[in-house]
Image: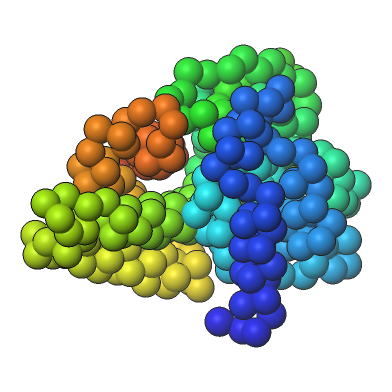
Amino acid sequence: MSEERDLLRDTVAALVEKHASPEAVRTAAASERGYDEALWKMLCEQVGAAALVIPEDLGGAGGELADAAVVLEELGKALVPTPLLGTTLAELALLSVSEPDSETLEALAEGTSIGTVVFDPGYVVNGNIADVVIAADGENLTRWTSFTANPAVSMDITRPLAAVGATETSPLGADPGLADLAAVLMAAEQVGAASKCLDLTVQYTKDRVQFGRPIGSFQALKHRMADLYVAVQSAKAVVDDAVADPTPTSAGLARLAASEAFSKVAAEAVQMHGGIAITWESAIQLYFKRAHNSAQLLGPPREQLRRLEAEVF
């Protein structure tokens, strides 16, 4: 990783630590727009988070997919609700055409416009707040110039979804494989969340005393946490490869590995925390819900398996 990307990671981590405590995340999720607008402004102005994938000649930071993945991974650690994922995907869609809409890209880069890409109209990330909506069907991109949006039922309060319907559309161009790019970025976010969930669990087992000693000192729990660490690090390696070289195969592998690792960590975190984990006050139940929500978005793991099997057999 480059020094610039390390600095980017550290800067985002510092903002998250200062402005996205568990209490702040809950407050942001419960707000009218579903995210902390002040933090979003800081991410855009101080970090350039929404401008990372846009070339400099179009008003962006001239970064790469890996830069956006780093930011999403750090935001994922604290389950920070932001419009970054959908906005970045909308930018990638606009950049894929021969003559990008520079005015729209500038607004997205500044964070004053919110974007999203529709893969399943029933469950659209940022769908409730987006003003730049692009649909991708694997072959073509279509911009929805007029649309309706209604909140969709989701158990994950930190990622509001919406059912979006088009009323007026215009063709944009060929689909460059946005579903694969979305899978890679989502996987990066999942790995970040899984890593933090595991850290919280390890710390809890150090603090929780039973039978006169911390429960983390029991051999059975040590083995389980070691297995979880291996699962997270293995998934991260797969995701890093996909970020560096996004292809349908690497994207499918990344999504599968990240979904399985995060779901496994979240499930074990509930078990190791005991009954407290499923109370509203606990952060663990939020990670558990995010794990299952994220695994189903963009197609559940079984669909990723079918895609990968089709390439092998």
Q: In this rendered view, identify the residue nearer to me: 285 or 117.
A: 285
Q: Position of residue 229 (x, y in %)?
A: 27, 66
Q: In this rendered view, identify the residue nearer to me: 246 or 222.
A: 222
Residue shown at the point (11%, 51%) measured from the top left: 211
Q: Position of residue 12 (x, y in %)?
A: 66, 62
Q: In the figure, residue 60 lies in which quadrant? A: bottom right
Q: Position of residue 22 (x, y in %)?
A: 54, 42
Would you place residue 300 above or below residue 71 in this image?
A: above
Q: In this rendered view, identify the residue nearer to me: 110 or 206.
A: 206
Q: How many marks?
A: 0
Would you place residue 138 above or below residue 45 in this image?
A: above
Residue shown at the point (84%, 68%) measured from the top left: 56
**For the N terminus, which image quadrant?**
bottom right
Q: Is residue 241 rendered to the left or right of residue 26? A: left
Q: In the figure, residue 160 lies in which quadrant? A: top right
User: Does residue 306 appear anywhere in the picture?
Assistant: no
Q: Which residue lies most toward the left here?
A: 220
Q: Is residue 13 rendered to the left or right of residue 241? A: right
Residue shown at the point (50%, 67%) measured from the top left: 243
Colouring style:
rainbow
Residue shown at the point (90%, 47%) measured from the top left: 103
**For the C terminus, which image quadrant?**
bottom left
